[in-house]
Amino acid sequence: MEASESGLPAEWEEQWRREKERRKQVLGEGKEGVEQDKRELRRIVAFNDSRSGLTSERAEPGGSEPREDEGPGRNVRPYLSQSFPRETFEVLRELLESGLLTDLTVTTEDGRSVRVHSCVLAAVSSFAEMRLREEAPRRDRGEVAPRRWSLFLGPDVDHCGLRAVVEFAYTGELLTGAALPQIETAARALGVPRLSDLRDQTASPKTERAVSAFEEMRRTLRSVEQLRADGVGCDVILDVSGASFHVHRVILAASSDYFRGMFTSGMRESRQARVALPLTVAPEMAALICCCYCGTLPVNWDTVFEIARTALRFQFRSAISLCLLFMKREMGASSCLDVASFAEAYGMSELLEEANDYVLRNFSEVSATEKFLDLQTDKLLEFLRSDGLSVPSELVAFRASVSWLEADPEERLRLAGKLMTGVRFQLMTFREFREVRAVNLRMEMREDVRLQGAAFKEFGSSPSVQDQRRARYPKDSLVVVGGDRQDPDGGRRVPSGEIQFINSLRSGTGLVKDIEWRRLSQIPDRPKFRHGVATIGGRLFAVGGCHFYAERDVMKSTYSYDPKRDSWKRCSDMRECRSNFSLVAHRGQLCAIGGDKQLNTNLNSAEMYDIEADTWSFVRPLDHPLSGQAAAVLDGSVFISGGFDARYVCLASLFLYDPETGSVRLADMMEDRAQHCTEALRGRLYVAGGVRNLRKFYTDQLTCEVYDPAGDSWTSLAPLPVPHVGAASAILEENVYILGGYCQEDQSESGLVHRLNRGTQRWERMGKVPAGVTDIGACVLKLPQHMRR
């Protein structure tokens, strides 16, 4: 199928160009239809949430960060459901066991027969595929395959062997208790080489299975998809606005409750060769049909709302989940208000909450979009009055309000007094309020709008401490663990065992901000620094580190903290003592990489922790010893940047690390650095802080840079305002936080917290860390509500 410049199939392009205008028609089908869609959407989402196997993600690893300025049809992203093969075959087995939509009867010589779905058997059996192709009429005559047909096998295949082939086709597994010779005979007669390979592996217990059952099901679905592309075995034609789609009824029924009901409940359409669908355009159905076969949905902001509505209408479970996932993951300043409208129209409270929260977190960027000017008065006032509104200064809220008023002055200026009650003038400085006076005077010259008096009253009031600031409570909590600091009285280093978390982010007068820290717990081990911190399954893990600066003080202990039970558990120790190392959560396990084993001796080893087995085991080592490096997981892959080599020289390297296959060198950073921070956010790596080599000495590294995996390239970012050597980092509400550290030049400690504002590309000072200042660990953890407000 020819592709257009946008990346969409050319035959879809013309229709999909119109969809940007049609997004405003979400509520245009009448109250009754919308209410029915709301009920169905809630049912589908609840169904998908209840299935533990549903883990959907982008099909393209290392995709670049979405650009809000790209035009219609751009930035098409294939989203896929990782659990799609398993879910599809669960339904196919249900249909098989119920005898529904089975169109092929396979009979052995002894007269015993098995009813199956022909396209599923043909996907694994070359013999069945050949016969199916012989039975299929020519597609260009507009015909479809016969509804029912039979296949008779020779004397070599008995019923047990046939059942093993069918079991493999629907599960990717061997039939339990079947004799291997019978399986081999059936596999050879029916042309199922994949089953023969599996039989050989089973016959040798010491041989590991090369391909999992899940991957076998994935292969089978790809073969079914190829049958559809060839028009083989397609037993119904869907007519949609002049376009015809040749498909397999059973595959549609496995993905859509709508079509399952249509084809299995005796409806008139269950007997028709052609079914006309009540759609005005075909692109949405084309995308949804493809998703039925491969679990992948190509979407962008020009298409996702229309596809979601169509998926809802025809009850495509996986597709609607992928659409909702796209909306959550790709939400941006120019799309969040559309998501909020969609969620409100269809009663999706969780999605609506996320969209509204995105507006509050990114109000400066959202208020600069054209869609912001179309907000209803009450909705805008709700945002302005929220304590969770995140703005660098209250002047931003005032400017946004003025822009909204001036977008339609004849209608809106009369609402100015009401709207300005959401602006907290008392949080402004005298310099900021000077602008308020100037704007108010201009507005009063145009209309009789008395704002100045109200603004002066608010500005001159003496609010309580509670009213002086906006306090934002993130859903997740940024947690800091351990670290050390210099005792100002004794002058010695004092390690910390404290664990504290950010409960709220507060904005005061002007640009003044601070953080409300709360104590969470105490490390049951000795106080530590230069340790590793990570989260898996809602649990926090604190691993290794130092108790002090002597060789014997390097640790290999592992502890886990469960916030639901507020309890610690001692886990198995690492194989080696490590400090100044990297710890990441990867493939459901912990991965400890490199680090210092003792003073001036770093490691090239790495090990993985299996949480279920409570065991550490060595994996593929690094190409060379490394410590003080930073690691982050991006789209399922581990990236390691910088660090000290064996001679403790700072590196500019970046490489991809896999515990099974080892390291792959990527483009070097623009600057060398160690004891720095690296975080993954929206398809990119953000690197900041640390130390660098300057001639024979270390000096502070203030430069920051961003890595794009798609182009294997680096670009510069705004430098840090102060040094952060040995700092911690984390992603909270899609913002990069750098916490603590020290200055290499004079060894001073500031303990400052900076946040990268991705809109302005500048670092904002947020407050200070509470306990340990340097070599601390940080992560993001969801805490029970009783620990919060």
Image (tube, rainbow, N blue to C red):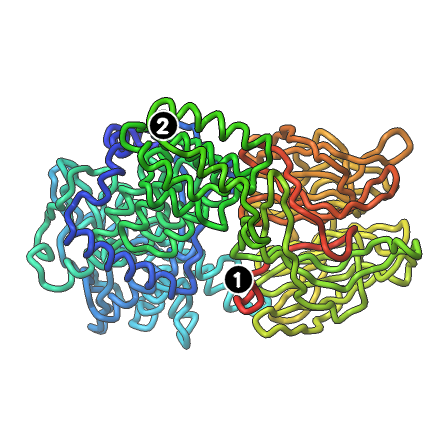
The three-letter amino acid code for the residue at tag 2 is Glu
Q: Which tag, 2 or 1, sits closer to the chain's start?
A: 1
Q: Secondary structure at mark 2?
A: helix
Residue 450, x across and y down, in percent: 38, 33
The structure residue drawn at horizontal position 33% and vertical position 59%, both measured from the top left corner, is: 45
Quadrant where the N terminus sits is top left
| Residue 387 coordinates in the image, percent (x, y) | 49, 50
In the rendered view, would you say 54 is above or below 367?
A: below
List the residue tagged with mark 2: 406
Q: Residue furthest left?
A: 268
Name above or below for residue 173 compared with residue 4: below
User: 203 or 275, which is in the foreground?
Assistant: 275
Point 87% across, 43% down: residue: 747
Residue at left offset 61%, top offset 34%: 707
Give the residue at mark 1.
Answer: 209
Residue type (three-letter) at the residue carrying disc 1: Arg
Image disc number at residue 718? none
Q: Which of the 4 image quadrants contains residue 569?
A: bottom right
In this image, 658 relative to 164: left or right? right
The answer to whether the residues at label 2 and label 1 have Cβ atoms under 8 Å apart is no
Q: Nearer the viewer's eye, disc 2 or disc 1?
A: 2
Is residue 128 visible in the rendered structure shown here? no
Q: Quadrant of residue 608?
A: bottom right
* Number of other residues with Cα within 10 Å of mark 1, as a class: few under 14, some 14 to 19, many 20 or more: some
Secondary structure of the residue carrying tag 1 is loop
Q: Position of residue 340 (x, y in %)?
A: 35, 46
Quadrant holding the C terminus:
bottom right
Q: Is residue 317 visible?
A: yes
Q: Position of residue 319 (x, y in %)?
A: 32, 50
